[in-house]
Image (cartoon, rainbow, N blue to C red):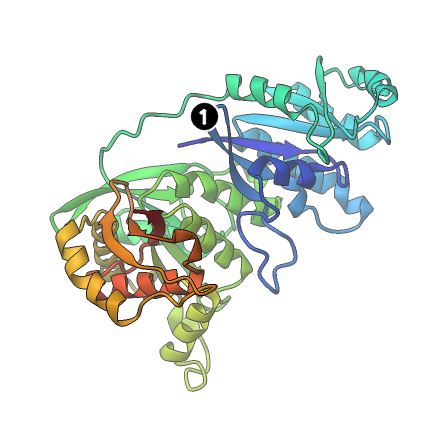
Amino acid sequence: MSAIVAIVGRPNVGKSTFFNRLIQRREAIVDAVSGVTRDRHYGKSDWNGVEFSLIDTGGYVIGSEDVFESEIDKQVELAIDEADAIIFMVDVATGVTGMDEDVSKLLRRVKKPIFLVINKVDNANREADAVEFYSLGLGEYYTLSSINGSGTGELLDDLVKVLPEKEKEVIDLPRFAVVGRPNAGKSSFINALIGQDRYIVTDVAGTTRDSIDTKYNRFGFEFNLVDTAGIRRKSKVKEDLEFYSVMRSVRAIEHSDVCILLFDATRGFDGQVENIFWLAQRNNKGIVILVNKWDLVEDKQTNTIKQYTERIKKAMEPFVDVPIIFVSVLNKQRIYKAIETAVEVYKNRSKKIKTRDLNDVMLPIIANTPPPAYKDKYVKIKYITQLPTHYPQFAFFCNLPQYVRDPYKRFLENKLRENFDFSGVPVTIYMRKK
């Protein structure tokens, strides 16, 4: 499980540019989906072999200038709660502002490693101007320019030294994380399963705070159920829940084998649910989708299960091979089917296919529908093998791997799914030179 590093600071100091430089690509890991107003800035980065998750809080500030202050305070508090280390970014061009002073006041009380980073320092004059930031009382600082990357190396050298060591993967029991928006019924779902009120369930969004593990034994199968939940201090209930549930889900998702994504049918498969879905998919976790409160959806004529399922699948494209189960946690409808399905998905994710079986099935399919020629070059796929990883990854050995395009890789993935059942599990395909 990798450490979490949060980047905080007021708007327009260059947090996103710095974030994009660290994850080494232009987009945030969860794509901006139409109808979602702000990018979810979550990505993976590594430095000198140390991997960490990076969260840019900048994507979450909404509202006008006067709302900014309270929003930023909330984010900094969340980052303090959740992250293992915090990068506090300021801008040398504007100098110390009142908002910077507010943030530093919050950070000075914290026992976690804080890195004060002064951005836009790209010449000697600005290096001299940076001295005024000593007044924030956070001690030594780092100067850098996130646009051209100068100065980032020293910061990262020191950052990875203080991150907690990655826990050795203890292959204990499989972990099923119950994730979703606040108030979708996650805790009630777990209570219904274990038949006792292990969690306090109330109607206040976000009464749950820490992820709690429950050992569970059913269908002759033992696993840990992780509720991205727990008890949350009353004062926290008013915060920006969207940012909170994404940040909270990051840790639970990274540390699980299967994600049970539960959402409220009356609110739909909205942008935030989609973000959590793509977070699980990018982390190559097994996924089961539970549509809760289906009994409360009005107008079943124009809103049949089939139509509703189609809409969810449209939002998940191209990864549509995911079980979708309609449940009512309150009436205990189909909740055991949900767990049975999660167990199936877990087995699919750990499935190992013999090389011989793979080649017997896939080579005739490839012979029938070979990769399209590219620039008059013909690709010949000779041999396929599954890689020895925690989730399904396949290497297709061929003469010209660089000429195999994504649509053909998707075709191969679909054929693997048709023949070997990887329902609910992301599959990765690599083209390798023979």
Relative vertical location of residue 149 with respect to residue 284 in this rendering, above or below: above
Within 10 Å of disc 1 (Cα), the crowding (few <14, some 14-19, many 20+) is few
Q: Is residue 45 left or right of residue 283?
A: right
Q: Is residue 190 left or right of residue 252?
A: left
Relative vertical location of residue 344 with respect to residue 295 in this rendering, above or below: above
Give x and y (percent) for residue 282.
44, 49
Give x and y (percent) for residue 108.
68, 19
Q: Is residue 74 left or right of residue 360?
A: right
* Residue type beneath disc 1: Gly
Image quarter in which the N terminus is found = top left
Residue at x 46%, y 54% (from the top left corner)? 278
Return the residue found at the far front. Answer: 376
Give x and y (percent) for residue 52.
49, 31
Q: Secondary structure at mark 1?
A: loop
Across the whole image, how many numbered discs are drawn on residues? 1
Residue at x 65%, y 46% (from the top left corner)? 59
> Quadrant location of residue 87?
top right
Relative vertical location of residue 325 with respect to residue 120 in this rendering, above or below: below
Return the residue found at the far left. Answer: 220
Which residue in the structure is indicated by mark 1?
49
Instruction: Tell me if residue 34 can be seen.
Output: yes
Relative vertical location of residue 383 with respect to residue 416 in this rendering, above or below: above
Residue at x 51%, y 17% (from the top left corner)? 161
Return the residue found at the far bottom. Answer: 301
Give x and y (percent) for residue 47.
52, 26
